[in-house]
Amino acid sequence: MKLSWGFLTCLGLVSQASSQSYWYETIAHQGVSPYNPQGSAYQVFRNVKAFGAKGDGVTDDTAAINAAISSGSRCVEGPPPGGCQSSTTSPAVVYFPEGTYLISSSILPYYFTQLIGNPNAMPVLKATASFSGLGLIDADPYGSSVPDYVTTNVFYRQIRNFVFDTTNVASGTQVRGIHWPTSQATSLQNCVFQLSQASGNQHQGVFIENGSGGFLTDLVFYGGSPAMSIGSQQFTSRNLTFHNSVTAISQLWDWGWTYIGLSINNCGTGLDISATGTVNGVANGLEVGSVTLIDSTISNTPIGIRTSRASGTYPETGGSLALENVVLTNVPTAVQGPSGVSLAGTTGTMTIGAYVEGNSYSASSTTPTTIAGTVSAFPRPASLLSGSDYYTRSKPQYQNLAVSQFSSVRTAGARGDGVTDDSAAIQSIITSATAAGNIVYFDAGIYKVTTTIYIPPGAKLVGETYPVIMGSGSYFSDVNNPQPVVRVGSTAGESGVVEWSDMIVSTQGAASGAILIEWNLASPAATPSGMWDVHTRIGGYAGSDLQVAQCAVGAAQPNTNCIAAFQSMHITPIGSGVYMENVWLWSADHDIDDSQDTQITVYSGRGLLIESSTGNVWLIGTAVEHHTLYQYQFTNTQNVFMGFIQTETPYYQPSPEATSPFSPVVSRNDPDFGVYCAGRPSTCNDAWALRILSSHDMLVYGAGLYSFFDNYSTDCSAHNATVYNEVCQTQIFGIDEGGSSETYSGSTVYIYGLNTLGSVSMIDRDGTSIAAQSANTNMYTEIVAMYVT
Ligand SMILES: *[C@@H]1O[C@H](CO)[C@@H](O)[C@H](O)[C@H]1NC(C)=O
Ligand SMILES: *[C@@H]1O[C@H](CO)[C@@H](O)[C@H](O)[C@H]1NC(C)=O
Ligand SMILES: *[C@@H]1O[C@H](CO)[C@@H](O)[C@H](O)[C@H]1NC(C)=O
Ligand SMILES: *[C@@H]1O[C@H](CO)[C@@H](O)[C@H](O)[C@H]1NC(C)=O
């Protein structure tokens, strides 16, 4: 029998087209944004081809793509009153099917835009020869002289699955792939940059000049000079590959930056951290604070790392550097200093076990040793490794699955309108889809729940942009009997694996008894559970009832209507094997939906508590901010990888002090500031950023623990040519320190690249200040390059 082509297609026997198709392109697009001024008419999902983009490699698609972005009521950049600084009410996913899209001027993604390409047939954004603009994608265009969105307040955006091609542009003309000044809960993932490979070219793949990032992963660069030109307060970057770049990475400035898994091939210079400028009024100061580089390879590149740090350079801890497990093949100079080779390389192959430049401390030393040389590598727990590298895993996009394998929560009857109680509908679809082996797809929306949502072993959940699960009502209001909004694995103890990505867990109004995420599930270290781009957000957005109107800074404090969470996240003693990547646990300091980003006072008791007795937790690019008692606390746990971790102390403290409004719970090993701070200055009563109690093999590869404010004033952390204040709080990071009964002991802690800001003491252990800020000064933070045990 002779079958016609059409007949085969009808039967679904021709799989050619489907191997390139992507479930997200074809799934029903039912996402909503209930607080958008357009109401139900607001469109979250936009396919650029529906807006006239051709993707044929011939038509200029710039205007059509920008029309897809700007359609509807969106947050258009610019200073108020005309422009918008930030908004949670106008999320957009701008989707690009396969194609080559010719671009003549910048694509301008507004606030809260996800640009997503088909990962099975990655769309190409190709610059015309006469392209003009700061980047093919300019995510924060310049107004008069500064970026339109304040770079440190740019949250919730992603770009993934694109090829950027600037090769039409003359090699000597400056052109960039992405201009990406950005902050927490943002990412670039799975992009390829085809740049000029000519010597002396002026092409760059990624340009970041400012912000408080952020996460970059799975990027491949061909050419560029440099391929990446980047500066930010702190950042985590993983799995970046460079071929034939004049310089792979030029670090403009930073406080701390963690690189995991760089692969640098056939470049001139690998990582250039030698930038200098006027720092605190001093000329020729080192602008790069600290860099941590691990699990990387550099091949056929004359200079691996270029630095300006040397004996006597300013500031004293500038250019702090830590390398661990870096393999060099034909890299004659490993580290090039300002006037000579700091670490020799090889024309053969060698592995740098560990190499550190900067100030070093141990548990028994209270004065720093300034070092520049090889050191013992940190002992790596086998359970955290894959081969000799730390285990890593990128956010799954499920690109090989058919659309029939996804179960939409809105199709299942959940509304996501911020008003309807969606508890039963959500629980029902999570249970049934997981039993059927399907993935639970959360369409964009705000899903109000009034009881705990339970996630069983085997569940996979994925959100469209960032749908919100919002705990509301009396169930979450008893501070003496806290209840989870989302519980992963039952309290009876369960094993299995869960995958969860692109979502926010939140609360509405007073919720002093809400634990936003409770993790009881035990997963194997070899195949851990994962959380990618899953965040908590406590207050500061439309629908939360925790905005400027309810939680004004000037109100009488503590304002009980704004006690909004007991805890952001808790991994209990029976939970284990958790991989967390690009996770931001945020108790709001300002109202994202206020036109002036006005500050608010919202109280959340605790940040991230890890008590897992087995441990095996990876924290890759995580941040925890503005919780009352602590940001990160580890109790009786082990085998934890952290890099980069970032915190901020609540801006209101110490007014009220950290003793208010939450009483310490002894069974949860809460800090008891009433005891610990007796007889000490008022600024002792500020939240701990990082507290490690009786825990082993705690490995920190880059940290930034910041305290900018006292009672909403930054005078306590002011830095300029004449003033260098670091007095917002007396202590910020404690090891076996400050418990209600002081019975903690024996922790083993290993740190590279510790930044603190606004704290008199940088590390406290067993009742002693180990590292004083005054001994480790830098541009803005203070930096300890290495601390061991
Ligand atoms: C970064 O932005 C902040 C304001 O958000 C500004 O004060 C600072 O000067 C900027 N830094 C650089 C290096 O552009
Ligand atoms: C690194 O990124 C490349 C390109 O996206 C990908 O193929 C590879 O699997 C990634 N490797 C790791 C270890 O994540
Ligand atoms: C905190 O600042 C406010 C506003 O400046 C002031 O009125 C109040 O007295 C301050 N509180 C303390 C304890 O200093
Ligand atoms: C430095 O900062 C202090 C404290 O904020 C301020 O009083 C002073 O005017 C500043 N000096 C300069 C030169 O900016």
Image (cartoon, rainbow, N blue to C red):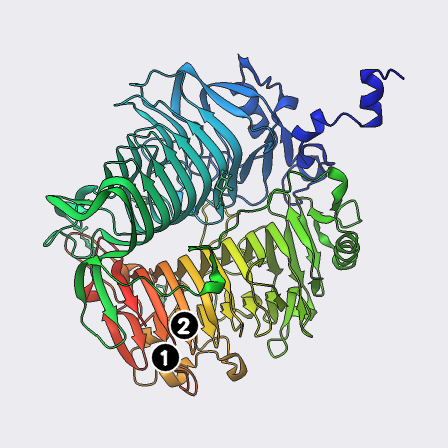
User: Does residue 363 sit above or below 186 in this rendering?
Assistant: below
Q: Residue at x 52, y 50 (%)?
A: 393
- Viewer-proximal residue among 634 and 588: 634
Q: Are marks 1 and 2 in contact (CB under 8 Å)?
A: yes
Secondary structure beneath dot 2 equals strand
Question: Is 14 on the left or on the right of 307, as rendered?
Answer: right
- Residue 339: percent from left, percent from top: 10, 43
Q: Residue at x 37, y 73 (%)?
A: 748
Pointer 1: residues within 10 angstroms few (<14), some, or many (20+)? many
Residue under numbered circle 2? 691
Placement of the N terminus among the 4 image quadrants: top right
User: Does residue 207 sit above or below 730 in this rendering?
Assistant: above
What is the number of the mark on residue 737?
Answer: 1
Type of amino acid under label 2? Arg
Type of amino acid under label 1? Glu
Q: Quadrant of ligand 4?
A: bottom left
